[in-house]
Amino acid sequence: MLDFVATTCPYCGVGCGFLLVVKNGEVVDTRPWAGHVVSEGRLCIKGWNAHQFIHHPERLTKPLIRENGEFRESSWEEALGLVAKRLTEIKGKTGPDSIAFLSSAKCTNEENYLLQKFARAVIGTNNIDHCARL
Amino acid sequence: MEKVKQLVKEMLRKGMVEGVMAPVRGPGDDDIFPSFITNENEADRIVLDSYYPFSLAKLVAKQGDKGAKVGVVVRTCDARALIELAKREQVDLNQAYIIGVECEEGKFPFAWCRRCEYLIPSMADAAFYLDGTVSANTEKGKELVSLLNATVVERKETPKEARERALKRQEEDFAELARLSPEERLRYWLSYFDRCIKCYGCRNSCPICFCKDCYLQPHKLIVASGGNPPDKLFHLIRLMHVGDSCVNCGRCEATCPMGIPISRLYHMLYRELSSAFHYEPGLDISSLPPLGMITDEEMKELGVELA
Amino acid sequence: MEKNFQPKILGFLCNWCSYAGADLAGVSRFQYPPNIRVIRVMCSARINPAFIMKALLSGIDGVLVSGCHPGDCHYMKGNYYTRRRMTALRRMLKVVGFEPERVRLEWVSASEGVRFAEVVNQFTETIKKLGPNPLQGKRLGTNLVKKT
């Protein structure tokens, strides 16, 4: 019924821990995690409200493809297939340096590593940056 | 104290409650997590000799199902908070079994615990004391105590000497501020408020703050959104809203990332108001918060001050 | 303390009694210092302590709250709540570091023109003795809504 799940904040690089209050499968609230080595039971306003996007009605839940100026829902296979096809086309036509990559502090370190490997090894460009200049 | 775990197991076994809110051991060595225990084996993880920096009373009030019976294992401050929330109709005490746990004087290193003059949860349904005895303080408490094989004693109150020692520690804590001139005191508090990063942690942790449509939200046009530190009104408004019923649980100060001594300010105000209104929060559910009610006697008083 | 310190005083007067009393004082030409700025409210219970706190944070030197005598409130019980609130507010100001004498509660009825003038006279003197608001000149955090 009521569960308390310990997790790390998805926002900045400090990495505070807190508890998500899960009621009947839905995340409803956040409580501080006093024993966490970084946050020690204290949170900033983003941490306190980090749970709000999880069930937000405006959150995207399916990949969308833009066709004729409008978005339509699609599957992961179709969307990723389209991305791969178009990137290969652009790389062939105007060269790898015509593609740039932008990453985010909201992604994990592992995801950032993956993206830069993709940019450098697969596409072959060093046009990659991060919102915090990582 | 182990008897508390036994009681929780019995309550679950008999199906008396949907579950029991209690502080449990977390993953780390010193971690304490809240938990809604529905499985007997979980009851072994309950922690009874530590301060827990969240309010179980607030969790029951906010997230509890209105129709479900629950048990709550609480320390005295949280038990008082539960009574205060019940006065504000946020919790139905008929649906809650309050299991109180006595606090050992001077054990916890926090300033607010040292100042606390309520060591014994006399307002709980069943109170568990440090010497292993229990008492049933209400009819519901008798139900609970009958499930156990324990030495039952009469309901206890916090001993007078302990209360007096606590009051003395309060005076010492407040003495530095009481000595300052008004302007110095103002500068002291305003410079602390300057540290505030408007995380709303104090409001989120405070068990007395229950309003869904809180006055401090930006759309109420008092506290601007964006920009720190917030208007000093933020703290003063919360002080006026909560001050008459502060139970000195200290969760506000425990969660403030900037180390503002919030609990000291609120407790100082509470001391003033408690003598003005003769009100002690969290003890008796029939005595309502002073700022929201008037008595028949005072309607006969003609002065500008309350007698 | 400068001799020509002219305090800024805010007066919250309840419509039915105190405002009428002040009006009577005016009509009868009873003199009282011009330092008071009057705000009419329907009942003294309309006054949220936040109004007074904001006034003090903005640099006002004194606040006078005036309502009907106990038992005479046009809305039956408003002034009793006001009395409780002002008691709490004054204690709160003392704890935080404002002099509680800067906020005063009075009961003035519609026929008490003389009394209103006296009250304002006395209060202005009190504030002159207390001196300017310690936050004078420093508008501390009074931004209401940030202009974006």
Image (cartoon, rainbow, N blue to C red):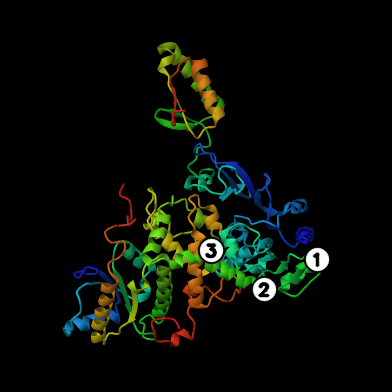
Q: Which residue is mark 1?
A: B147
Q: Earlier in the sequence, mark 2 or mark 3?
A: 2
Q: Position of residue C108 (x, y in %)?
A: 30, 83
Label 1 or label 2, whichever lies nearer to me, is 2
Query: From mark 1 to mark 2, how far is it between C-alphas?
Result: 28 Å
Q: Considering depth in this image, is A85 or C12 the residue closer to the camera? A: C12
Q: What chain does badge 3 belong to?
A: B
Residue B129 placement, left or right of C49:
right
Determine whether the residue tagged by mark 2 lies in a helix, strand or loop.
Answer: loop
Residue B128 placement, left or right of B34:
right
The three-letter amino acid code for the residue at tag 2 is Pro
**Quadrant in the picture for residue C56:** bottom left
Q: Position of residue B188 (x, y in %)?
A: 41, 59
Query: Which numbered tag is attached to residue A17?
Result: none
The three-letter amino acid code for the residue at tag 1 is Leu
Residue B242 seen in the figure: no
Q: Considering depth in this image, is C62 or A106 the residue closer to the camera? A: C62
Please say if the residues under marks 1 and 2 sit with CB atoms less than 8 Å apart.
no
The three-letter amino acid code for the residue at tag 3 is Ile
Q: Earlier in the sequence, mark 3 or mark 1?
A: 1
Q: Which residue is mark 2?
A: B159
Q: Is residue B13 above or below residue C77?
A: above
**Quadrant in the picture for residue C16:** bottom left
Q: Residue at x 68, y 45 (%)?
A: B29
Determine whether the residue tagged by mark 1 lies in a helix, strand or loop.
Answer: loop
Q: Earlier in the sequence, mark 1 or mark 2?
A: 1
Q: Residue at x 31, y 61 (%)?
A: C135
Determine whether the residue tagged by mark 3 lies in a helix, strand or loop.
Answer: loop
Query: From mark 2 to mark 3, how far is it between C-alphas?
Result: 26 Å
Q: Which quadrant is home to the N terminus of chain B?
A: bottom right
